[in-house]
């Protein structure tokens, strides 16, 4: 008997089952069951399910980021205060409000009655009781500005704060006072502009999006009208016509300025596309400042550049022309930092001529001493610069270097590095001593964008590539016939090396182009990769070459050598500063004699590479790649010396204890070093490193203490997915507790571990997002199908016993509905609306049923299957690819056909069946017959009828099991799956086993467990467990809405009212279902998986049937699996009834902080910056929100709507018409009540423009 642990891992749950089993003799018992739940709010789970990685602390992280931005802004302001104070530029009242001793640069704390000091306003002490108790400080400049506005013809009142824009303009050519300059400098600290090197052209090259603010000249209503409103032609000031549909008249737009994002369609050469009338194709949409800020930014920058003024001048000149112009958020929203930086540089350089303090070296040294009293290195580094550099580059526009995240890059499994480091340990005396230690760790993996990795990946792809020709019995590998020589493979490599992406059509297309295969036969060939998937080519080289072609002076293919390509890649990959990046590009162009301006223009906006990394280090790839290259790309000198020695010993058969027999077996056919070329990755790994997938770390956990040790050393956030990380660590804790409780910590307690990962866990974000959308659609479909079945139950024309709760009846109707929907050329809008509606009305269901009466066409006979006969024994659900050969129970593998046709088809694929039995006449019940379609008829019908379902069509047209299905079924190599397996592997591995995954660890898929749960009768047992809940609900509600006793099955049939069914699942109302799933996983063995995944291996199927499948009374094998042991369902029911659910302790709200701050510490007479733990008192920190965010007060938002006159009288206080409101108010004052006022307006209608008003705006 083996002790087997089954685990079912979900996003916030861990189901576990410990069993003792003998699979061969069908004996076993359940030792223990349980569910561990990780408390997590539903919104976080929903976010993760939709494909977004979400941490429970994400909100706190967001707010902390906001606080840091404010803190850094305040820190820059404090540093400016300290420098400007030394220069003597701060106004006296402002300087007095700042603390320059205890907290240098910070404002002093406000006491009662104090006010927040402003640099440009002085408290008016003469009139303390006057509301306007402040006076503007820079009145001379204000008066100068007012005079300029008077000359421009503006005599309105001018806000004193606009003086700032005037000073920014004036400071470019004239002297301004020290205090005014301080105001200008401090203002630049507030708006610094947008700065990011990654402002690359990610936009679609076939369309151009621009921001425009245009005045509406005219509105023309068109004759086009439907339920959504009238179409209008909006004539804009530049002659463009904007077509818009609206229910409300757009007359009020006339004369107003409207903002648009205008999209212009472009040809490949960049010229705008035109319609049949010769007009440029443009589309308009309203502006969304969150999404369209890039287009708005580009437009603003263009306006400033065209004005040939600085940003400050541009704003001031605009205000002179239009004083009503809103500045922030309208005229200037977001612009590049370079505009502000250039303006400040010009201002400071000009003012240096008027203020000698700005060129005083002693004052400059004093400022450096004030800011960097301990940082001698930086102080000495910038002592040769002046105040312009200090203000601009060291304070206001200082950009903190990004923190290195190199530690998060994975380690190479082949190469290591040894290094010395200093560690500090605490002595018995309490003092800390430093000691030097030697450590070894793996080398960091290479960036995927690196040219070496791009070449490595492409050679790997080609060396694994196989071309198959589709034959009648089985596909034949014809790779060696199509690419017989090394030169042919190299030619294919050179072709693929110029492609950004590689699909099957590209490879087959290349072979057609080279006349290796005929154009007419290209459909008969496929590759060994997933047929409908696109793989990456040499993406980086392709992008480099396409941009170099625009320069036009060189041949990019000849220009790019290993050196030049790597050099350019390194610039784009490593230089983050925008100015430094452009300098580096210029240097590159000059070094290789390229047109510098053209080169800069094409590479300035190059999209930064994604920070993705491979599985090998650069050092490892440099050793593997020379053995993978072929033809002219292979060179013996490229092979490193150690590998050469190993190759010589392998070829000569010389003994070396570091070369295993397995490696010699793999390379047995190689006779010289020249044969070591074109090797697949696994063989190259054996030759160079003596291993491939074998684990380098054969550690086995021998006690629960080993798990504790791993958890204590586990680095938080190392998985970069907080939800998955939390589940994995909690899984190890659960396993540790099981080991301790049931096994008393005994070494080797677990013989096997079986694990199933929830689909949310193992799927990447983009797949989870698609799944979330699909689940919503499926839920709506299921509800619609149930309602439709209920309608059919009451239809006298429908034959058979229709059951709305039957899964098989639900499935057959889904297939029928799908077939009818795809079989018609055009679907009415109302039908589409019903299909999307989760809860259609009774009238809609009846209309939908009439539409379904068109009928489903049997794919094998071409005969219509009427809806009225659908639920009789005349028709069955049929698997296109039989379950005996490929287990796929999805709707895409099902069709409906005549029952007798299904029997004849047996275990053949649909295409095999028609090809072999075409035209055959089959006898049906009641003496009827039906003729099978010919191959041509079958193909025509399927391609027309199932054109909307490519997956089903592909299965119908496949004579054999399509390769893509196999690949996806067997693919379990995702990172999270690997991580789970590598951790659990340490519990059951044999230390002598060199394989990366122990045979004692069995991964199980959800498809297998779903099949076994059904066959072993556990679905019924689960309903038995939850039935008391539904019985209790019936008692509470005094109804039968939640189920009834069904005598036909001698069991309680649970149900839920229709209005509660959306989102409801019988499985998920009880956490014990995780334990049930884990029990099935524990009782699953390799033979179950082997049988269900066996593809066309009839010998394997027959060998396994006796030990797995239930036999009928006639001795035939059924499709149901044998129970793990006799009485298993009853044992499962008993164990589940006594199972308790445990919850992870997650109630911590506060804990002590572990704060560390960077401080200058004296080490051996030198000052060094170190992280120093906080020792002053105990601080407590709140670790989760105490409540949800709430509003501070109720806000009345003015929303306008039109109502009938009588309704407007009832809500007269909110009327927009002030005259009417005044009239009603006077009537109420006269003592009239609401009824009399109604009567009054009936006799005296309220008139406007000579007509009685019938509707009012409130």
Image (tube, grey):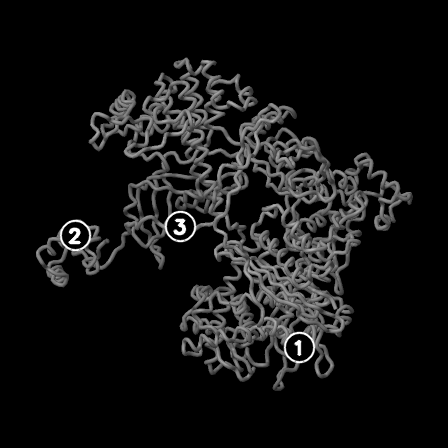
Instruction: Identify the residue under disc 2.
Output: 1221
Hey, which quadrant is residue 318 in on the image? Answer: top left
Q: Give the SS element for disc 1.
A: loop
Q: Residues within 10 Å of mark 2 (few under 14, many from 20)?
A: some
In front: 1174, or 290?
1174
Along the horizontal axis of the image, is 207 left or right of 739? left
* Left or right, residue 273 beside residue 1134: left
Q: Which quadrant would the N terminus be assigned to in this image?
A: bottom right
Point out residue 515 in the picture as x, y percentages from the top left corner: 74, 49
Residue annotated with mark 3: 1189
Q: CA distance from mark 3 to mark 1?
A: 54 Å
Label pair 3/1, CB-CB below 8 angstroms: no
The correct choice, above or below, for 363 with respect to 1143 in the image is above
Location of residue 193 with respect to 734 vertically, above or below: above
Q: Nearer the viewer, mark 2 or mark 3?
A: 3
Q: Which residue is mark 1?
A: 1127
Q: Is residue 436 visible?
A: yes
Relative to the observer, which residue lies in front, 891 or 1100?
1100
Task: Give the x, y percent position of residue 442.
Answer: 71, 41
- Closer to the camera: disc 1 or disc 2? 1
Q: Is residue 309 visible?
A: no
The local secondary structure at tag 2 comes to: helix
Percent x, y of residue 656: 88, 43
- Element type at mark 3: loop
């Amino acid at each position: 008997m083996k002790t087997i642990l089954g685990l079912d891992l979900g996003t916030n749950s861990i189901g576990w089952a410990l069993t003792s089993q003998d699979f061969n003799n069908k004996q076993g018992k359940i030792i223990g069951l349980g569910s561990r739940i990780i408390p997590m709010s539903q919104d976080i789970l929903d976010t993760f399910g939709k494909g977004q990685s979400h941490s429970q602390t994400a909100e706190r992280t967001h707010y902390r980021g906001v606080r840091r931005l404010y803190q850094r802004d305040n820190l820059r302001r404090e540093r400016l205060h300290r420098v400007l104070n030394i220069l003597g530029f701060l106004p006296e009242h402002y300087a007095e409000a700042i603390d320059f001793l205890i907290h240098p640069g910070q404002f002093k704390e406000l006491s009662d009655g104090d006010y927040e000091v402003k640099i440009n306003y002085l408290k008016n002490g003469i009139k303390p009781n006057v509301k306007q108790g402040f006076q503007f400080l820079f009145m001379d400049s204000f008066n100068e500005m007012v005079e300029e506005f008077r000359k421009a013809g503006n005599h309105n009142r001018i806000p004193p704060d606009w003086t700032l824009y005037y000073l920014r303009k004036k400071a470019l050519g004239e002297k301004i006072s020290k205090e005014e300059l301080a105001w200008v400098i401090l203002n630049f600290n507030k708006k610094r502009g947008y700065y990011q090197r990654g402002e690359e052209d990610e936009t679609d090259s076939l369309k151009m999006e621009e921001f425009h603010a245009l005045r509406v000249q005219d509105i023309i209503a068109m004759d086009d009208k439907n339920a959504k409103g009238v179409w209008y032609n909006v004539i804009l000031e530049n002659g463009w016509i904007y077509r818009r549909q609206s229910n409300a008249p757009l007359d009020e737009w006339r004369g107003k300025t409207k903002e648009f994002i205008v999209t212009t369609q472009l040809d490949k050469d960049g010229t705008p596309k035109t319609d049949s009338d010769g007009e440029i194709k443009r589309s308009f949409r309203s502006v969304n400042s969150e999404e369209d800020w890039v287009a708005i930014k580009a437009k603003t920058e263009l306006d400033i550049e065209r004005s040939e003024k600085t940003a400050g001048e541009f704003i001031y000149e605009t205000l002179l022309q239009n004083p009503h112009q809103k500045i922030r958020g309208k005229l200037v929203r977001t612009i590049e930092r370079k505009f502000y930086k250039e303006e400040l540089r010009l201002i400071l350089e000009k003012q240096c001529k008027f203020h000698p303090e700005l060129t005083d070296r002693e004052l400059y040294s004093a400022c450096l001493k004030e800011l960097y009293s301990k940082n001698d290195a930086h102080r000495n580094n910038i002592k040769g610069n002046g105040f312009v550099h200090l203000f601009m580059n060291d304070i206001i526009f200082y950009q903190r270097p990004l923190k290195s995240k190199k530690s998060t890059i994975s380690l190479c499994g082949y190469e290591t590095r040894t290094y010395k480091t200093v560690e500090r340990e605490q002595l018995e005396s309490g003092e800390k001593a430093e000691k030097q230690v030697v450590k070894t760790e793996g080398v960091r993996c290479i960036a995927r964008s690196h040219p070496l990795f791009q070449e490595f990946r492409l050679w790997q792809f080609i060396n694994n590539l196989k071309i198959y020709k589709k034959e009648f019995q089985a596909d034949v590998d014809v790779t060696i016939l199509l690419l017989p020589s090394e030169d042919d493979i190299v030619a294919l490599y050179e072709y693929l090396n110029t492609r950004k992406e590689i699909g099957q059509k590209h490879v087959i297309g290349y072979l057609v182009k080279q006349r290796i295969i005929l154009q007419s036969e290209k459909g008969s060939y496929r590759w060994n990769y997933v047929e409908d998937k696109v793989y990456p080519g040499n993406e980086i080289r392709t992008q480099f070459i396409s941009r170099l072609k625009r320069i036009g002076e060189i041949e990019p293919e000849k220009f790019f050598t290993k050196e030049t390509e790597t050099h350019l890649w390194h610039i784009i990959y490593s230089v983050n500063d925008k100015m430094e990046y452009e300098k580096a590009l210029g240097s590159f162009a000059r070094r290789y004699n390229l047109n510098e301006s053209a080169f800069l223009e094409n590479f300035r906006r190059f999209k930064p590479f994604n920070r993705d990394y491979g599985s090998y280090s650069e050092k490892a790839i440099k050793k593997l790649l020379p053995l993978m290259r072929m033809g002219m790309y292979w060179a013996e000198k490229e092979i490193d010396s150690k590998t050469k020695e190993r190759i010589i010993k392998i070829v000569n058969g010389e003994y070396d204890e570091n070369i295993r027999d397995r490696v010699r077996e793999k390379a047995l056919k190689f006779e010289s070093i020249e044969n070591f070329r074109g090797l697949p990755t696994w063989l190259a790994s054996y030759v160079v490193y003596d291993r491939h997938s074998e684990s380098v770390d054969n550690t086995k956990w021998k006690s629960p203490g080993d798990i504790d040790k791993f958890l204590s050393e586990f680095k938080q956030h190392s998985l970069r997915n907080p939800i998955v990380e939390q589940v994995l660590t909690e899984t190890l804790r659960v396993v540790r507790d099981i080991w301790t409780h049931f096994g008393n910590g005994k070494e080797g307690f677990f013989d096997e571990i079986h694990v199933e990962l929830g689909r949310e866990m193992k799927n990447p974000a983009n797949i989870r997002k698609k799944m979330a959308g699909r689940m919503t659609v499926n839920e709506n479909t299921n509800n619609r199908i149930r309602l439709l079945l209920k309608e059919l139950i009451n239809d006298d024309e429908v034959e058979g016993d229709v059951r709305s709760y039957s899964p098989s009846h639900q499935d057959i109707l889904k297939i029928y509905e799908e077939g009818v929907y795809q079989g018609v050329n055009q679907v009415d809008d109302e039908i589409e609306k019903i299909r999307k509606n989760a809860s259609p009305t009774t009238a809609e269901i009846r209309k939908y049923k009439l539409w379904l009466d068109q009928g489903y066409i049997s794919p094998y006979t071409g005969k219509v299957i009427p809806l009225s006969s659908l639920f009789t024994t005349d028709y069955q659900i049929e698997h296109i690819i039989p379950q005996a050969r490929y287990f796929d129970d999805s709707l895409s593998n099902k069709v409906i056909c005549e029952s007798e046709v299904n029997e004849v088809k047996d275990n053949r694929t649909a295409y095999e069946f028609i090809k072999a039995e075409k035209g055959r006449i089959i006898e049906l019940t009641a003496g009827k017959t039906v003729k099978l379609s010919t191959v041509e008829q079958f193909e025509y019908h399927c391609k027309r009828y199932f054109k909307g379902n490519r997956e089903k069509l592909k299965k119908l047209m496949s004579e054999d099991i399509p390769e893509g299905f196999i690949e996806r079924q067997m693919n379990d190599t995702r990172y999270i799956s690997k991580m789970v397996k590598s951790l659990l592997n340490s519990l059951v591995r044999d230390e002598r086993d060199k394989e990366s995954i122990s045979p004692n660890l069995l991964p199980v898929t959800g498809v297998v467990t779903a099949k076994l749960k059904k066959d072993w009768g556990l679905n019924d047992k689960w309903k038995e467990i939850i039935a008391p809940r539904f019985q209790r609900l019936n008692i509470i509600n005094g109804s039968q809405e939640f189920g009834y006793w069904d005598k036909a099955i001698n069991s309680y049939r649970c149900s839920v009212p229709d209005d509660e069914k959306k989102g409801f699942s019988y499985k998920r109302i009880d956490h014990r279902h995780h334990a049930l799933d884990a029990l099935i996983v524990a009782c699953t063995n390799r033979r179950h998986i082997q049988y269900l995944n066996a593809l066309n291996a009839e010998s394997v199927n027959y060998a396994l049937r006796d030990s797995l499948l239930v036999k009928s009374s006639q001795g035939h094998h059924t499709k149901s699996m044998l129970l793990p042991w006799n009485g298993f369902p009853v044992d499962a029911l008993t164990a589940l009834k006594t199972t308790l659910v445990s919850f992870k302790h997650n109630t911590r709200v506060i804990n002590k902080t572990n704060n560390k701050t960077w401080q200058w510490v004296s080490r051996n007479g030198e000052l060094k910056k170190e992280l120093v733990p906080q020792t002053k008192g105990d601080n407590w920190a709140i670790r989760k929100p105490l409540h949800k965010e709430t509003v501070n007060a109720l806000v009345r938002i003015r929303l306008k709507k039109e109502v009938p006159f009588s309704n407007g009288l009832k809500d007269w206080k909110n009327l927009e018409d002030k005259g009417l409101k005044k009239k009603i108010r006077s009537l109420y004052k006269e003592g009239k009540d609401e009824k009399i006022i109604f009567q009054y307006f009936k006799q005296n209608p309220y008139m406007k423009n000579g007509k009685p008003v019938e509707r009012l705006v409130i």
